[in-house]
Structures are given as structure tokens and as C-alpha cells.
Amino acid sequence: MTERVAHNQWSSRLVFMLASIGSAVGLGNIWKFPYITGEYGGGAFVLVYLVCIALIGIPVMMAEILLGRCARANPVVAFRSLVESKSRVWGGVGLMGVFAGFVILSFYSVVAGWALAYVVDALSGAFDGLDGKRSGALFSSLTGSPQRLLFWHTAFMLLTVAVVARGVRSGLERLVTLLMPLLFVLLALLVGYAMVAGEFARGFHYLFDIDFPRVFLQCSDDGACTFTAKPLLVAMGHAFFTLSLGMGAIMVYGSYMPRGASIAGSTVVIVIADTLVALMAGLAIFPLVFANGLEPGSGPGLVFVSLPIAFGAMPGGQLAGVLFFLLLVFAAWSSSISLMEPGVAWLSGNGGLSRVRATLILGGAAWLLGIGAALSFNLWSGEDYQFFGRTWFDLEDFLASNVLLPLGGLFTALFVGWVARRRSSENELAMRDSRLFGLWHFVIRYVAPAGIVLVFLNAIEVV
Ligand code: TRP
């Protein structure tokens, strides 16, 4: 008997791609990308993020898909089964991924809960005639209430558990085929609105004008400036986060991928879709931020404060608001499912648990951890509840996004580049152009690992 378990498959390559886009596109694009771009000062940060996507994200995504499909197994087993020694060490990388997904899920569910709460607010007409100040107050009244946050966090976790317990395939296919394209259209409309009603040129320049000193120099009041590598680390971490890389989510999805479907082609489509959504969210949000006198660096509330002002002012804004936050919930849902899937596939495949029980255990534990994330905005926001100088929420995000995911990506690249046989990668990728394969192999062997290590070394003082 091998360790591999019987594996179901997506019904087509299209479904694999839609599911992966569903995993990649989520709160990372619409909530996190704009707010960290604002925190780190715009253009140059966006550029570094895009470079990380191209040089590290694309090759690592191909590596994850190919590992998953080659092994037809969950990440813990995939690593183990592809090394001849059956070494348990590489299984540890899969386990680290399961842990990272679990940590991310716990705070992800809290933020998705904000979106759920905003669906109800939008329905009740709470956005009508909001200005910047009142919109800020609306958001603070939500995050200031532990009861409301816990209620919506619980509701979202239940949604996630309900789909994962049934098996990803049946629930997910329908969800993503219809709703992802709809979200895209609505975002495009919002960009259009920002062109008319916001300070579009200013928002555009903020996102795309490259000003390295503004992002990478930290200046004190007396004018002395020092270089900081923190934006570098955060941009790289976000490249992993937004593409769902570094913890085995895409690997598990790849393991359900039909043979013969092109890995490189699918990767390019997924990455382009994900990047487009993030840039569109930025283009919709920053013009409104500037037009309404909001602070770009105001933190995690940025999207939830800026967009409701637009919905409150535009014709048909109530419907648009409801629809937007509803679609955001769906986007978050199709992502949170993939955060859980590697752990559940492992616990139920090799841990001997039933799928339902594995889902309940993992979801319950993530729910518990998420309570700390919810309280970080109210009861635990003070100094007494700081861990390494961060709130629980920030600590979870930092640890998972900026440490565990890049580490997972580093090991994936090293594994595929140095441990797995070149021949198996070549067969699995089946690229028509052998020079292109050579380029990918070079990048996965040298460029991606060196890039990740360099960023880590530069950013050591940040931790
Ligand atoms: N990529 C998703 C987003 O941008 C979040 C996500 C889903 C994720 N699965 C993941 C992040 C796996 C890291 C790893 O919202």
C-alpha cells in the first residue's frame, strides 16, 4: 500500500482554474493589498510586489501545481512520496503549510465577518449620505464591538466548514463559475465610478509613481533617514498570500487537476486574474480615499471606510453596496475553503479521521484562535495584550504571511529545483518550448530561492 489515497478530480481544466482563481482572489486583493499599499507609501511598494509576483510567484505556483499533480496527494504526503528516501523531513514542510493555513484562516474569518456585517449595513441603508468621518465611525462601531465581531466571525467559519465538510468539489464549482466573473464586473464599475467621482489621477499616481525614498527611507523628526527593509518583506509576503502560495493550497488543488492540462498556461491565467483584481481594487479605492480626505495609511479599515462613502452617494448605491459586500464574502469564502483543504485532506486521508470530523476539528480550532484576532480591535487592543509589539491579529498576519508562507515557498522551490528529478518536472510541465522549461528550471533552482533568502536576510531586524 502506498500512502497515497484515492483522489477525486476536477471535471475539467477550466474548473481547476476557476477554483484556483477563487482561492487566489479574496480579501488579499480587495482588503489587504490596498491597505498595505497605503501603509507603505504607494508606487514603489506596488512595484516590488509585482516583481515578487513575476520572479517568485509564477515559478513557485508552477512548482506547487506540478508537485500536487505528480504525487496526487495532499501536501504532507506529496513531499514525502516524491523523495526516494521517503524522508519524513520534507513532510514537515507540508505540515508547516497546514499550520500556516490554519493561522491565516483564523484571522481571515474575522475580516470576512466584517464584510458579512457590511452586507447587512448596506441593506439597512446605513451608507446613505456618509462622509469620511461618519464612515470611519460606522467602521469603528463594528470593530469596537466584541459581540458583533464574534457573531460574524462565527457565521463565516460555519459557512467555510459547511463547504469543506462536504468535499470541495461539489460546493465550489458552482460558486466560482458564476460569482467570480460578477465580482470582476462590479469592480470594473467601481473603477468607472472612481474616475467620475474621485480624484482618479491622484489615486493612479499614488499607485504607480515610483518613489523609492518614500517607501524605503524612515526619517525621524530631525531629518535623519535610514533604510528599512520592512516594505520588502511585506511585499514579498503579500505576493505569496495573494496567490495562495507557500502552504499547499494550490498544491492540493493541483492534485485534483486532470492530467494533460497545461500547468504553465493555467498559472499565467490565474496570476493575471489575481493581479488585475488587486490593481482594480486599488484604482477604485485610492481616488475615493483622496477625494474624501481619508488617510491612505489608516490601516485595515481602508476599504471598509472608503467604499461605503461611494455607495452612499451614487445612484443605485444601496443595491451596489449590498452586491459588492456580498460578492466580497463569496470571494473570501472560496479562499477560506482552500485555506482549510490541505489540512483536511491530510487529516482525513492519512490521519484516519472522517472528512466531517477533520473539518470540525480544524475549523473549531481556527475559530478559537480567531477570537484573539477579533478582540485585537477592542478588548485586547491595548499595550497589555501586545505580543512582540503587535496585537494578536497583527502577530498572526505577520507570522503567517511574512514568515511561514515565504519559508514554505522557499522549501517548495528547493525541493523541486534540487531534490525532485528534473525529468519528472519536465514530463509534468510538458512545455512545448524546451528553452522555456530551462528558464523556469533555472529560476526555481536559483533565482526564487536566492530572492526569498535575500529578502529574509535584509529584513531580520524587522522581527
Ligand atoms: N489568496 C487569498 C486572498 O488573497 C487568501 C488565501 C487563500 C491564501 N488560500 C491561501 C493565502 C493559501 C495563503 C495561502 O485572499
Image (tube, helix red, strand yellow):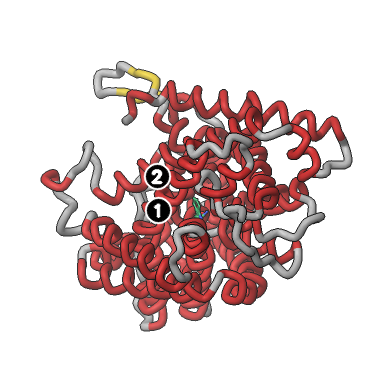
Q: Can residue 171 be seen in this view?
A: yes
The one nearer the camera, 207 or 324, is 324
Mark 2: C-beta under 8 Å from nearest atom of ligand 1 = yes
- Secondary structure at numbered mark 1: helix
Q: Are marks 2 and 1 in contact (CB under 8 Å)?
A: yes
Residue at the spot of label 1: 104
Residue at the spot of label 2: 400
Residue 261 relative to residue 256: left or right: right
Q: Where is residue 357 in the image (x, y as percent from the top left)?
A: 40, 71
- Secondary structure at numbered mark 2: helix
Mark 1: C-beta under 8 Å from nearest atom of ligand 1 = yes
Give the quarter of the figure containing the C terminus.
top left
At 58% from the left and 50% from the top, the residue drawn is: 279
When the figure is inspected, residue 138 is found, relative to residue 75, above or below; the finding is: below
Q: Distance between the residues labelled 2 and 1?
A: 6 Å
At 59% from the left and 71% from the top, the residue drawn is: 172
The one nearer the camera, 221 or 393, is 393
Q: Is residue 313 visible?
A: no
At 40% from the left and 53% from the top, the residue drawn is: 104
At 40% from the left and 58% from the top, the residue drawn is: 105
Q: Position of residue 25 (x, y in %)?
A: 56, 58
Give the residue type that dot 2 points to: Ala
Give the residue type that dot 1 points to: Ile
